[in-house]
Image: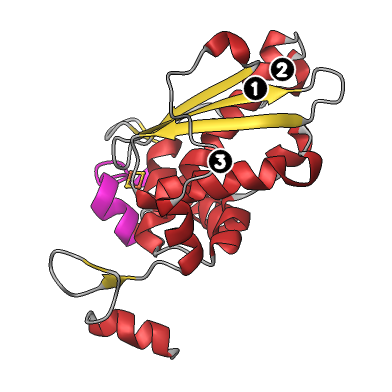
Amino acid sequence: MSSHKQESEKGTKGDVSSHDKTKSWFYTDVVKEHFFNPQNFMHEDANEEDYNAIGKVGSPACGDELRVWMNVDPETEIIKEFKWKTFGCGSAIASTSIASVMVTENGGMTLEQARKIKPQDIMERLGGLPQRKFHCSVLCDKAMRDAINDFYRRTDQFDKMVVEATRIIDPVSKVTDHDIEEAVLEGAHTLELVQQKTKVGIGNPGCLPAVEELIRFYKDKYFG
Ligand code: FES
């Protein structure tokens, strides 16, 4: 076991302690640097006419929200500017700040390159995040995807839009695939834990194979 993990489990030396004192959270120096000095933060009120790709996402897990404004070169589809604002926590601020650097550094990424960025790539640049904060890094990824779709919508390139639809997995508990995604992001990686969070399948066991498949899918997508 690494000393990092040992300290975390002892709950004595983390940056932040949870309220029950059983665990501490560690933030890397990169996370702290981007939290205290966020890059490309939209300080003023956004003049939306100055941007041609705008995205927004809310987090069902914590109720926070994140907005992204991008300037995309219409010829090359390279991201020239990436501004953002969030009501989210320090992890969301650090994740979005580093993502804004990743898509604009070295002349900028094309929209298709930016769309290939995964939350794991953001985590890697940050040197990691506490697992309970992983969903915060997914927020900026989703807001950016929303902005990319917005650009394609504005330029009538509907075939390039990628829309993630929500579907009901358990009609009894009204749990959707999105609820299961959020549960996995919150650290529920087994059927039992997902059921504790969502009650999925408790009155309708016939849906459990589909639930297990989704848990595998989202674990692989975000933690694989
Ligand atoms: Fe809401 Fe991190 S963004 S807890």
Respond yes or no on whether mark 1 lies under 8 Å from ligand 1.
no
Q: Report which residue position mark 1 lands on.
A: 149
Viewer-proximal residue, 119 or 190?
119
> Mark 2 and 1 residues: CB-CB less than 8 Å, in contact?
yes
Q: Against 154, is 214 above or below?
A: below
Count of numbered tags? 3
Indicate if the residue with disc 2 has its beta carbon within 8 Å of ligand 1.
no
Residue 133 pos. (x, y %): 38, 56
Residue type highlighted by circle 1: Asn
Q: CA distance from mark 2 to mark 3?
A: 17 Å
Whether residue 190 is visible here, answered yes or no, is no
* In this rendering, position of residue 176 left or right of residue 173: right
Residue drawn 55% across the image and 37% down it: 40
Residue 203 appears in the picture as rendered = yes
* Placement of 113 over or under 219, stated as above or below: above
Stretch of the chain drawn in magenta:
192-207
Secondary structure, mark 3, is helix
Q: Secondary structure at mark 2?
A: helix
